[in-house]
Amino acid sequence: MNSNKNLSDENMRKELQNRLKGVKCMRKSIACIMVTVMFITIISGFLPLKVYADSVTILPNDSNIKYFGRWDKSDTTDYKSEWPGSYFKVNFTGTTLKVKLGSTNYVNLYVKIDGVESFYPDVKDTVELTPTPLSSGEHSLFVACYKEFSTFEFKGLELEQGAYTTAPAVSDTIIEYIGDSITAGYKLTHQTVADYSWLAAEKLGYEHTQIAVTGMSLCDTVDQNGNPVYGMESMFFKTYGNTTLSNWDFNQYQADMVVINIGTNDTVYNISDSTFQSTYTTFLENIRIKYPSATILALRTFNGYYADPTKAAVDARRSSGDNKVYYINTNGWTNSTYFRSDDSLHPHENGQLMISQTMAPVIESYLSAD
């Protein structure tokens, strides 16, 4: 009886030992798992983990995307521009491409992929730019807003999985145009990308910006109802084209040349010659403060409005020691055949083209001289 009892006790001890060993092994396994998880968590903060998806989103702050014009970059996921003609360039790989825009504002896009032009009127959200897939390899992309009075919201590009961006070739020279409806391409089908300013800079291979909008005067004034009207003397220094808020940061870029064609709309508000001249002189001085090294060309308006006050303002600045500001007499640059028959004020497409062909060598000669 005692022998059997001793044997039973021994079996119980062995069983208990085996169970304790099992618990210890389990504890070791749990500890190993915890250490492994902690190790993965730590190294994941230092090593990139591959995430597989159908597409890759390139955010606006990608360093390979080069911007021209006035862009509000305060939100790294949503760059905005309101001055017409703002654009960006980038190269990319892969066979498909989409552009991501804002969901509220419609915009009119001018797109060039490998030099082939396309137009996308009144689009928003995500826009397919390659309905027919491209060949494999590297491609160039150029995207601009071609109509005024719209907010160009750019939220990024969508590439196929494995594709990536590279830096595009860009010019070191930037031409900045200042003007009104004639410079903004008013009444042209494709507006900004068909006006003389865009065409002249593109012909020369230079980058360009257009600080121009329909109805813009030079002088701040009031309308017939006593409401304030902000002219280019104020608006040129703003980030956006239809508000008096947000001063532009001129450290974003420096223009090599500024071409001014302004004054037609000042006649609407009966601005006197003396006021126009004084305002223009101060305007040139303020531009010089922002662009210390730029060559400045002040054009006679094509219709001749305020020609003498414009020249007098330039002469005043040159007399003060600014030898890089010039008056450009545009008399003879246009004739009646250049203008639309419905208003005889705004050049039609071919008229804009002809003006650009006259302007391009003028720009080149003054850049070379300075």
Image (cartoon, rainbow, N blue to C red):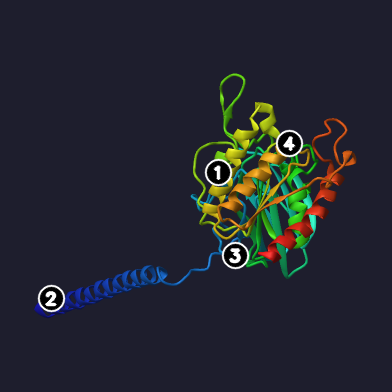
Q: Which mark is residue 282?
A: 1
Q: Residue at x 65, y 64 (%)?
A: 370
- In the rendered view, tell whether residue 268 sits above or below residue 354: above
Looking at marks 3 and 4 on the same chain, the residue that comes earlier in the sequence is marked by 3
Pointer 3 residue: 64
The alpha-carbon separation of the residues under discs 2 and 4 comes to 123 Å
Residue 134 picture location, percent across and down: 77, 63
Label 1 sits on a secondary structure element that is helix
**Does 170 sit left or right of 74 as displayed?**
right
The quarter holding residue 114 reads bottom right
Pointer 4 residue: 305
The alpha-carbon separation of the residues under discs 2 and 1 comes to 114 Å
Residue 262 picture location, percent across and down: 68, 41
Residue 23 picture location, percent across and down: 25, 71
- Labels 2, 4: front one: 4
Q: Quadrant of the N terminus?
A: bottom left
The quarter holding residue 112 reads bottom right
Q: Which of 95/64 is in front?
A: 64
Pointer 2 residue: 5
Query: Pointers 4 and 1 in contact (CB under 8 A)?
Result: no
Looking at marks 2 and 1 on the same chain, the residue that comes earlier in the sequence is marked by 2
